[in-house]
Image (cartoon, grey):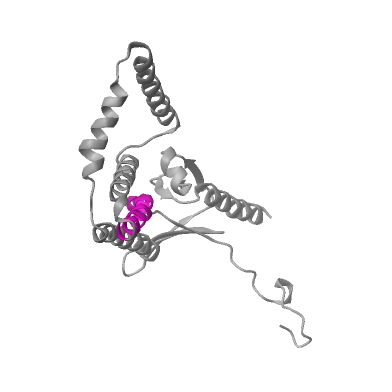
Amino acid sequence: MTETGKPLTPGDGTKPKLERCTIVSYPKVVFFYPLLFASIICGLLKQFSPDQSEIAGSMFLFFFLFNMLVISFDFPGVRALVIVFASMAIVFGLILLQIKYKIEILDFITLFYRKQIHANLDCSAVFYYCISAILCIMIGSGILSNWLWNRWTIEPNRLVHRKGLLGELKEYPVIDLQIDKKIDDVFEYVLLLSGTLTFQPGQGVQPIVLENIPLVNRKEKRIQNIVRKFAVTRGE
């Protein structure tokens, strides 16, 4: 504030706030957060509704399978659609076989699951709580460690990489910085709106590939605005 009580502006001799964007590549374990929440719900079901233990076990098994598929394989747009439509075609095909030819394949699969798997899925609430605690620690420590020791910052005139316990800095110019965005996995995008950002600082420099960037579309727009403003300012 000035002596007259008016707020300071850049024209009053103050420096404008430096616009920047921080980017952190999240570890793969962060995509296990659905299993984390499912484990908590399963633990509560087992603790307060012991008669629902089989439902809790089936729920845990489903989310475990889903998360393992997301982590183990990449599902780009075309492959994900193929898998979805192929699964639907198989289910409808089995239904038609059962209706037309009285081949009770679905009934056999359902009965087998209910008697051999569902009826025996009985774990304690402590088990589910331990799984959720382990996942919470792994996800939290993975995100925190990358934020502290492996983050990238886009500033109007440079790209800065902070790495390691000692905070080692490495800078790249943004004069000729090229940015490429890619959605590698549909399910990972659905879970965290995440994708891959690739930076090409200039000729003769290896591309910088950052995977598992959450809110990748928003991050890319912010970076493009910063780089564009720097180019306009430099041209003036």
Relative to residue 12, is residue 174 drawn left or right?
left
Write the start and end of the magenta stretch as one range: 28-47
Q: Is residue 104 visible?
A: yes
User: Where the N terminus falls, by quadrant?
Assistant: bottom right
Relative to residue 34, is residue 182 depicted above or below? above
Residue at the extreme front of the image, as rendered: 51
Q: Position of residue 71 (x, y in %)?
A: 32, 43
Residue drawn at (35%, 15%), measured in percent from left and top?
A: 97
Question: Which corner quadrant of the image does residue 12 belong to?
Answer: bottom right
Which residue is more in the foreground, 235 or 49?
Answer: 49
* Viewer-closest of 79 and 180: 79
Q: Quadrant of the C terminus?
A: bottom right
Q: In the figure, residue 166 lies in which quadrant?
A: bottom left
Q: Is residue 32 rendered magenta in the image?
A: yes
Q: Is residue 182 above or below residue 168?
A: above
Residue at left offset 44%, top offset 28% = 81
Instruction: Specify whether residue 93 is painted magenta.
Output: no
User: Is residue 196 at all visible to an observer of this figure?
Assistant: no
Residue 169 in picture, x, y percent from top left: 39, 64
- Say whether residue 26 is left or right of residue 103: right
Image height of 17 relative to 56, above or below = below
Q: Position of residue 124 (x, y in %)?
A: 23, 57
Specify the farthest residue to the top: 101
Q: Position of residue 199 (x, y in %)?
A: 46, 47
Magenta segment main secondary structure: helix
